[in-house]
Amino acid sequence: MAQLGRIGFRIVTDPPRPEPALVARLYGIPSANLADAMGRFHFMDPGIRLRSGTGVCGVAVTVNARPGDNLMVHKALELARPGDVIVVCTNGDVASAVFGELMCRTAAGAGAGGIVVDGAVRDVEGMASLNFAAYSRTVSIGSCDKDGPGEINVPIACGGTVVMPGDIVVGDADGVAVVPRSDAEEVLALVTELVERERTRIEEIRAGALFKSDIDETLRRKGVLA
């Protein structure tokens, strides 16, 4: 792993990445289940909404952008590997769109897995026509500069949670979960158990057991029921 530039205006190259097979095993797992498996942490707040496409599952390439500037977002698209997800912190700017249809065409052509912006995007109809997965806090017609400074592949905050380069970003219509790279194997094991418990409960409901007995047990412990 090397660094080009200096703190505040730098690109970190080749940060540690999870194994592709591990990322693939997380594909299709609901974001809500992942959040539950991680103790109801490590998910983005509901202000981060799906604007186009159907969801994401890929390795995070992080961007720390100056408000009103997307220079490093452009460069991150070039550095991303196929399937990677560009995750952008705009440092509070919700009026200057850092991503739109032209950049989306570049991203789709390069095989990027999607983008998540804690800030604004635009040209939603154009992105939707490409079926490209894009999440953002706002949609705005405002544009931005391409001058910097900014940083690529550094720790950022996006949607109220920490995103490290190399983390696994999993998003669907409900929201976006961030699986820390260092904990991914453990999270996969935990969420597999959780999904199996839910399947069992679905079968119980189909069999007629509509209500869970432990609800009344909890109410008895709380003194509500005798």
Image: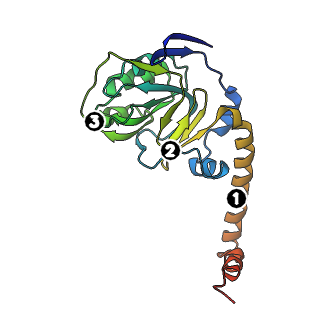
Question: In the image as oriented, which residue stretches furthest toward the left?
Answer: 142
- Pointer 1: what residue? 199
Outermost front residue: 7
Give the spatial CA distance, label 3 vs label 1.
Answer: 43 Å
In the image: residue 98, left or right of residue 185: left
Q: Find residue 165 and report its horizontal and vertical position in percent.
A: 57, 26
Q: Name the amino acid type tagged 3.
A: Ala
Position of the N terminus by quadrant: top right
Q: Residue at x 69, y 83 (%)?
A: 220
Classify mark 3: residues with Cα within 10 Å, few (<14), some (14-19) or many (20+). some
Q: Which comes sooner in the sequence, label 2 or label 1? A: 2
Residue 51 screen position, x and y as percent = 38, 41
Q: Amino acid at mark 1?
A: Arg
Q: Nearer the viewer, mark 2 or mark 1?
A: 2
Quarter of the view holding residue 77: top left
Instruction: Looking at the image, tell me whether mark 3 or mark 2 is earlier in sequence order.
Output: 2
Left or right of 47? Residue 35 is right
Query: At which x and y percent is residue 25?
Result: 68, 37
In the picture provided, is 17 more to the left or to the right than 80? right
Q: 118 or 27, which lies in front?
A: 118
Q: Residue furthest bottom?
A: 226
Look at label 2 and name its amino acid.
Answer: Met
Residue to which mark 2 is pinned: 44
Residue under the point 51% across and 26% down = 62
Residue located beneath label 3 in the image: 95
